[in-house]
Every structure is written in C-alpha cells, then in structure tokens.
C-alpha cells in the first residue's frame, strides 16, 4: 500500500507542475499557425507559463482540480495490507499538501464544506489481463469540467448528429474552458460508459490518433471544424481553438447512440505509472 500511496502522491504533484510534452509541443506549433496577433501572444504566454511552473516547481494553474484516478488492475494482482481506495486517497492527501496545491473539494455538493485535503478522489477501476497495476492521475479543473455535455442521440441521428454534438459543445463553451482545448469524446455504451470514455480519452496524447482509420479521420475532421469556430486562444479570437480531439468508442444498444464530450483546458493534466 505504501508503494501505491507514494506513486499517487508523486503523480499529483508532477501532473500539476509539469505540462505534458505533447500539449507543450502543440502550443508551440500553434504559435506558428495562429493568424491572430493576440492569439499568438496568448499562446506564447501559455508556453512561458509552463516553463516557469516547471522551473519554479509551482502549479501550472491555480485550479489544481478534483483528482480523477483511473486504475488498470491486472487480474493476477493481489493487493494486501489495506484498502486500495484509501491508499489512493492518502496519496492525494499527501501530494496536495506537499505540493502546496489548492484544495478544491467540498464534502457535500449542497452544504459546500471544504474537505481541506482535496479528497476524496474520483476513482475508476478496470480489470485487465496480467500482473501489473497502472495508475493514471488526472487533476480536472472545473472551468473545463463544467462545459461537459452528454447527449442520448437516436441511431437515426448518425454521424452527423455526433459531429453536431461535439462542435456545439465547444462552441457553447466558448472561452470558459480556457482554450485552446483538448476535446475528449465518448461514443457508444450506455450513458455512464460514454461519459467515462470521454474523460479517459483526455489521457491519450494528442499526437496519437485513434487506431481505427475511420475514427482517426473523424478526429481530424472535428479538429478542423472546431478551429474554424474562431473562438481562439483564451476565447479572444483566432484559429487555434483546440489542440486535439480524442475519440473513444464502445459497442452500444440497437436503440441508442450515447455521445459524451469532456473538454480539457490548455493544461489538460495527467500522469501515469505502472507498478
């Protein structure tokens, strides 16, 4: 349990301080592509902000998020010595204290009393083959989280309905999720499966496309359409509204077409470790 706790602690700190290389590289490329002077200036500031955060060991954003954890547990793994869930929450607790990260979690959604240590984390478990334990930590700020969309489309809505749902979600979000954004899309399954897929899609590096050529092409088409919306960096206009679109899919019922959109800000944070 101590190993799991230490891993989560480390990931909480590192994810909040160091911008992932795929996103930083996309911001740098965006400076070259952005046609708006204001947009280019904003992108340059975002890159500089990431460099300062890394150099000074400071949080890259003041909203250090609610900690979302995806655990891929090998079916041959046997965990002893206590509760896996408590080990994760203890790691979050220690990481946020050691990293001087803002505590943003309230113990009750209505009475709004801060828990004081950013716990509990949101934990998703997946049983996989093998004897490894992989932990993904993704602190999620709510400027972007509040822009989430879930639509239970009809099968007759088809691919055009999916495209409209994604583009409308980004358009209506506007400047709120701190663009340029990363767009996670979950298609299929059930209501909750689509939502979880859209969140997990944000873990995939934006320089790695969906392995299915059909969805790879759809990701690119959606990215191009989103960048024609004119929202731009910080919502002040421009052609770099999104850095990437990641789509995940799952089989679904003959009568349904669930689509979920989860938007990540320009510092969509995540880190992973395999034990």
Image (tube, rainbow, N blue to C red):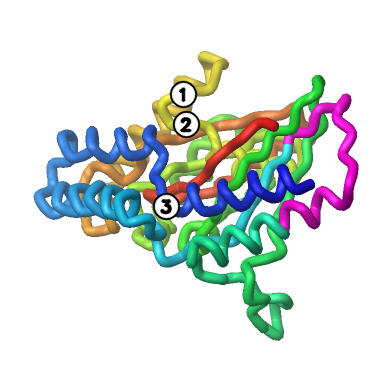
Outermost residue to the left: 37
Q: Are marks 2 and 1 in contact (CB under 8 Å)?
A: yes
Res. 225 visible in picture: yes
Q: Residue at x 77, y 31 (%)?
A: 252
Depth order, front residue of 100/38: 100
Mark 2, Cα crowd under 10 Å, few <14 / some 14-19 / many 20+, is some
> Which is more foreground, mark 3 or mark 2?
3
**Residue pictured at 49% horizontal, 48% vertical:** 15
Residue drawn at x 69%, y 33% as measured from the top left = 134
Highlighted magenta segment, given as a residue range: 72-89
Residue 58 at x, y = what percent? 38, 59
Quadrant in which the C terminus is drawn: top right
Secondary-structure class at tag 3:
helix
Kindly identify which residue carries mark 3: 17
Residue hosting label 1: 208
Between 248 and 120, the one lying in front of the other is 120
Say if residue 168 shows up in the picture.
no
In the drawing, does residue 270 fall left or right of residue 178? right
Residue drawn at (67%, 83%) of the image:
113
């Amino acid at each position: 349990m101590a190993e799991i706790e230490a891993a989560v602690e480390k990931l909480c700190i590192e994810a909040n301080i160091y911008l992932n290389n795929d996103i930083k590289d996309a911001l740098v490329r965006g400076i070259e592509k952005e046609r708006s002077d204001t947009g280019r200036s904003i992108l340059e500031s975002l890159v500089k902000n990431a460099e300062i955060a890394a150099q000074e060991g400071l949080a890259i954003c003041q909203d250090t998020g609610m900690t979302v954890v995806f655990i891929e547990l090998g079916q041959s793994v046997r965990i002893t010595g206590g509760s896996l869930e408590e080990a994760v929450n203890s790691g979050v607790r220690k990481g946020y204290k050691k990293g001087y990260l803002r505590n943003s979690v309230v113990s009750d959604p209505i009475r709004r009393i801060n828990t004081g240590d950013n716990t509990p984390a949101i934990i998703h478990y997946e049983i996989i083959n093998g004897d490894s334990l992989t932990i993904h930590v993704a602190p999620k700020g709510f400027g972007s989280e509040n822009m989430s969309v879930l639509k239970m489309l009809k099968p007759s809505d088809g691919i055009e309905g999916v495209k409209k749902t994604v583009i409308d979600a980004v358009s209506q979000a506007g400047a709120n999720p701190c663009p340029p954004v990363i767009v996670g899309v979950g298609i299929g399954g059930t209501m909750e499966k689509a939502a979880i897929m859209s969140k997990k899609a944000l873990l995939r590096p934006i320089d790695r496309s969906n392995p299915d050529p059909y969805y790879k092409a759809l990701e690119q088409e959606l990215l191009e359409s989103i960048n024609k919306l004119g929202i731009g960096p910080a919502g002040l206009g421009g052609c770099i509204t999104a850095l990437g679109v990641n789509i995940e899919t799952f089989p679904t019922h003959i009568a349904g077409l669930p689509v979920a959109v989860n938007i990540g800000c320009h510092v969509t944070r995540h880190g992973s470790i395999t034990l």
